[in-house]
Amino acid sequence: MGRAFVYVILGGGVAAGYAALEFSKRGIHHGELCIISEESVAPYERPALSKGYLLPEAPARLPSFHTCIGAGEKRLTLKWYKEHGIELILGTKVKSADVNRKTLITSNGETISYKILIVATGARALKLEEFGVRGSDAENVCYLRNLNDANRLVDVMKTFTGGNAVVIGGGYIGMECAAALVTNRIKVTMVFPEAHCMARLFTPKIADFYEDYYESKGVNFIKGTVLTSFENDSEGKVTAVILRDGTRVPTDMVVVGIGIRANTSLFENQLTLEKGGIKVNTRMQTSNTSIYAVGDVASFPVKLFSSDIRRLEHVDSARKTARHAVSAIMNPNSTGDFDYLPFFYSRVFTLSWQFYGDNVGDVVHYGDFSSGRFGAYWVNKGRMIGAFLEGGTKEEYEAIAKAVKLKMTVKDMGEFERQGIEFALKG
Ligand code: FDA
Ligand code: NAD
């Protein structure tokens, strides 16, 4: 049993949806492209799962957030794929890949062959078991990576309205889920090992603002520690988490967001890996010229950072790496090097921030922290290389993005700090 396609996208997440749209824009024939996805729905905008999807009132539900609605483009429904002759092989996991034979074998035992493969397998949530904690498969412990996880989280939240939750991890999932839990009238305790939340990006000053805000919403922080075990009732439900120092935190439910691991395992020993992902060049091409990698699974050279290889875990890079790969496949001669400005963002409660560039070097803060309109700039070797802005306008966000892209020169740090957002706006 087998089928052959010219182009195969392995994985049906954000990057797959944007790649499909790009293929259709550039002109492919019916039957040339297929997407194989373990998920049972067409590609969707994953960020919705920790935001609109978790709202108690009028929550977002598919088909409203299929790709590529998040970038203001077409919403690709099942009908769209059908009309465009793009085969969607859903609910199907690829079990093995042979890059020499150019074949994939699915969980149904089908062999799918390709001329060109785009690997868009994304990442999986790390499990507590990988850190030596047992029992995270209990029915009231939730992770959040895909639609099934989100449905489970919604069900568990509904069961415990008015109750308590422990959130493990102070990163993106932890912060966004804690906000969603509060909005669902569940009292939250956050537990994480670092000294402050969002340690990979926030400065202590930005984190202070966020922690104060969350505390004003009733969130309790237990920092600088991890959980070591769960306490369960006779039915196996978690009733408390036990921390390293023995502290017992009673709870009705637990949400875990302790990072991800890129889904590279099909290609280990077949493609070059770096920084936890599949290494690609500026055309998103892997060490095998017939295979491209995009999104969370790809480690690519960031021209702006002297072509340092980075693996980014954000939706904007999934969208843009996907488009670039398709452009490089379909128009090899007119596609230049991928020149990407890293862009991250988040929205919680009524707060929202954007970040561009890299958060290394000296940092200065600006703006008014008491009114929630503030930011930070990172400066390295006299150039601005990173910018964060909370509560900005469209014009201000565009200005900081441009300033980082240009790596604007900073002559006088004091003056730079004093000017704040004006520095970027003046250009
Ligand atoms: P993605 O994970 O989207 O898709 C991978 C697909 O491959 C999945 O469909 C998976 O089932 C499939 N797959 C994997 N292995 C397979 C196999 N062997 N066979 C078949 N199928 C396989 N970013 C941001 O910038 N702003 C934000 O607000 C958010 N918010 C956010 C919320 C939540 C809940 C999550 C989990 C993530 C975010 N992100 C985000 C991150 C962003 O969603 C992420 O960077 C992109 O989804 C990455 O897109 P990919 O297509 O690379 O992977
Ligand atoms: P993360 O890397 O943002 O944060 C992981 C957190 O878990 C950190 O605070 C870390 O210190 C903590 N941690 C690690 N080990 C721990 C342990 N043993 N016990 C307790 N805490 C531990 O990862 P995440 O929050 O799980 O997010 C998963 C993925 O989803 C990331 O790729 C992220 O980029 C993506 N995401 C992005 C957004 C966004 O961009 N707005 C929103 C949601 C999710």
Image (spheres, rainbow, N blue to C red):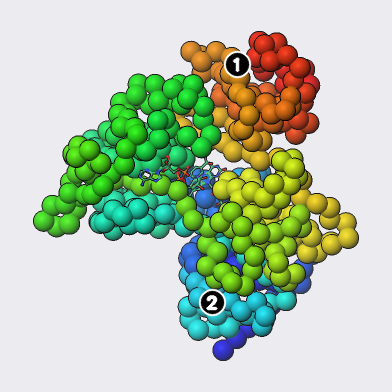
Label 1: few (<14), some (14–19) or many (≥20) C-alpha neighbours in 10 Å: some
Q: Is residue 215 above or below residue 108?
A: above
The quarter of the rendering in which ligand 2 is drawn is top left
Residue 28 to residue 379: above or below: below
Secondary element at tag 1: strand
Image quadrant for the C terminus? top right
The residue at the point 50 percent across, 75 percent down is 95
**Which circle's residue, 1 or 2, is located before the other in the chain?**
2
> Foreground: 222 or 391?
222
The x and y percentages for residue 400 are 69, 27
- The residue drawn where x is 67% and y is 26% is 379
What x and y, as percent, mark residue 92? 50, 72
Residue 419 visible (yes or no): no
Mark 1 vs ligand 2: CB below 8 Å = no
Query: Observer-nearest residue: 43 or 58?
Result: 43
Give SS at disc 2.
Answer: strand
Residue 30 x/y as whole percent: 72, 73
Q: Which mark is residue 366?
A: 1
Which residue is outermost to the bottom? 1
Viewport quadrant of the N terminus: bottom right
Question: Mark 2 belongs to which amino acid?
Answer: Ser
In this orientation, which residue lies closer to the viewer: 68 or 311? 311
- 47 or 211, which is in the foreground? 211
* Three-letter code for the amino acid on which mark 1 is drawn: Tyr
Q: Is residue 267 left or right of residue 60?
A: right
Image height of 22 relative to 98, above or below: above
* Horizontal side of residue 40 vs 380, given as left or right: left
Disc number placed over residue 96 in the picture, else none: 2
